[in-house]
Amino acid sequence: MVQDLLADWGPFGHPLFQDPRARKLSRVGVVDVGSNSIRLVVFDGAARSPAYFYNEKVMCGLGKGLADTGRLNPEGKTRALDALQRFQSLADGLGLEPLNAVATAAMREAEDGPEFREEIERKTGLKLYVIDGQEEARLAAQGVLLGWPRAEGLVCDIGGSSMEMAQVSRGKVGNRETSALGPLKLRDVKGGKKALRNHIDSELNTLKEALGATDDRLFLVGGSWRAIAKLDMVRRDYPLRVLHEYRMLPDDLEETLDWIKNTDPEELRSLAGISSGRMALVPDAADVLLGVLRVFDPKDIFVSSYGLREGLLYEQMPQVLRDRDPLIEAARFAEAKDARVPGFGKALYRFIRPIYAKEPLALRRLVKAACLLHDVSWRTHPDYRADVCFDYATRANFGGLSHAERIFLGLALLHRYKNSRANGRFDALVDLIDPEDVTRAEVLGRAMRFGAMFTAQRAEQMGTLRWQPKERKLGLTIGPQAMTLYGEVAQARFASLARALEAETEVVALSRAKPG
């Protein structure tokens, strides 16, 4: 079976999410007991690119005051136990397998951590695994690999009481280290701002020496980093409020960190919709991030919504599943669940593929995803279908998709249903991608709009497109079975595609073979 799956590997090979090994991962519950928050996440859908079926967080502050007392915060323990009892009840009600539960810095450092762990198991039945800093770094890095299979760079995961770093390259986690640079720990540093900066730089230089050579790309993991990214979006008036794969350049980020330092936290909180508990950690986290920029000097900074919890799911995946493209797997799952004719996306891609025969792999990948998703919003009211398609692509929970690629995919799906986008609602987002890509997305949309006219046909019956880019000639060879579908509307859509390509057309109609 494994060899069959490997032989069938490809963007339109056997849907691996239907394999029993992958289906076991289709609904998995994970609990993360951190120093500041406790969260339950239930993953569902295509295992390689899971959706968040359930997601709940409680800000408990277990690590608050730990440096002074050596013990977990008493109020935090009460809130944590209440939250874990609730999470276990939810898991039982959903019929989940035993929850995968891990605890990090506060639980591993507190003298009463083992005692509290036993109390949790006794009262909830939940078996909690307390992991060390290097394991925390590894799992967070695996979470990044779940969304970025080809990630190359340094993963930086900040929690309440610690900060971890790990190298990722070629789908593997390399060197990793941990430090006491969590915001809750920094509050205990004495001596004012200068002493705090020296402490942060000292810790970071130790990390840098231990990690060795690092890449110029930095992946930020953790709630405090995401809060800072939200504020960066607000300051820049960035129109796509999707945190995953949000890109920041060092100079822009330094401006945001300076703005955070000189602005009232309550004002910042209301501007970005950040909880008060999270906002309380942001100023200290901002000091750490400034230090990371000073010491590691990254050239590219990306935010990852995936971290330790996703890393726990990745840990359970067979390699054949890890090797799949998360975007394509998610698109295939969506088609199987929501399209009118599941499986037609494959035929549609094969039909329009000649237009993209000489295009780069990165573009062909987006074309494949678009073909799979071209019909998943059909239940939307026709007057709003194009807009909803755009919103679906730009805001969907997809991994392996940059912001520019989201917008490209959204435009292509919009033009699958409508030639024009005259209302201007999307202009701010469209401005984020190159004009050439806007044109390519329009062409793709019109190609799918034309190909969808043959939905009733199998791939071999749809006819054949021919594209000669140098001569600007678009040809269509169509057989008798498909000719009945090549009516007035289909002809108009073919002409629309040709105009988008600035091409002349040639249609060849094949006759039905006569009996011998």
Image: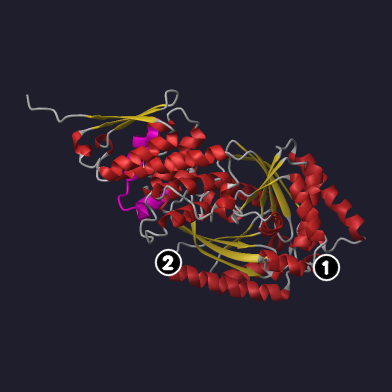
Q: Residue at x 20, y 29 (%)?
A: 510
The amino acid type of the residue labelled 2 equals Gly
Residue bearing the label numbered 1: 68
Q: Residue at x 42, y 59 (%)?
A: 384
Q: Quadrant of the N terminus?
A: top left
Range of residues picked out in magenta? 331-353
Check residue 429 in the rendering and tell me which mark sits there, or answer none: none
In x, y percent, where is residue 208?
Answer: 78, 42
Q: Secondary structure at mark 1?
A: helix
Distance between mark 1 and mark 2 Cα atoms? 41 Å
Q: Is residue 512 magenta?
A: no
Q: Left of 189 or right of it: where is 292?
A: left
Can see residue 495? yes
* Residue nearer the viewer, 114 or 106: 106
Q: Left of 474 or right of it: where is 481?
A: left
Q: Secondary structure at mark 2?
A: loop
Can see residue 1? no
Residue bearing the label numbered 2: 95
Asked where in the image residue 38 lies, by quadrant, the reply is bottom right
Tell me which label, 1 or 2, sits earlier in the chain. Answer: 1
Q: Are marks 1 and 2 in contact (CB under 8 Å)?
A: no
Asked where in the image residue 153 lies, by quadrant, the reply is top right
In x, y percent, where is residue 15?
Answer: 37, 44
The amino acid type of the residue labelled 1 equals Asp
In x, y percent, where is residue 16?
Answer: 39, 45
Residue 78 versus residue 353 in the image, above or below: below
Residue 279 versus residue 308 in the image, above or below: below
Q: Residue at x 41, y 32 (%)?
A: 355
Q: Is residue 350 magenta?
A: yes
Q: Left of 275 or right of it: where is 454?
A: left
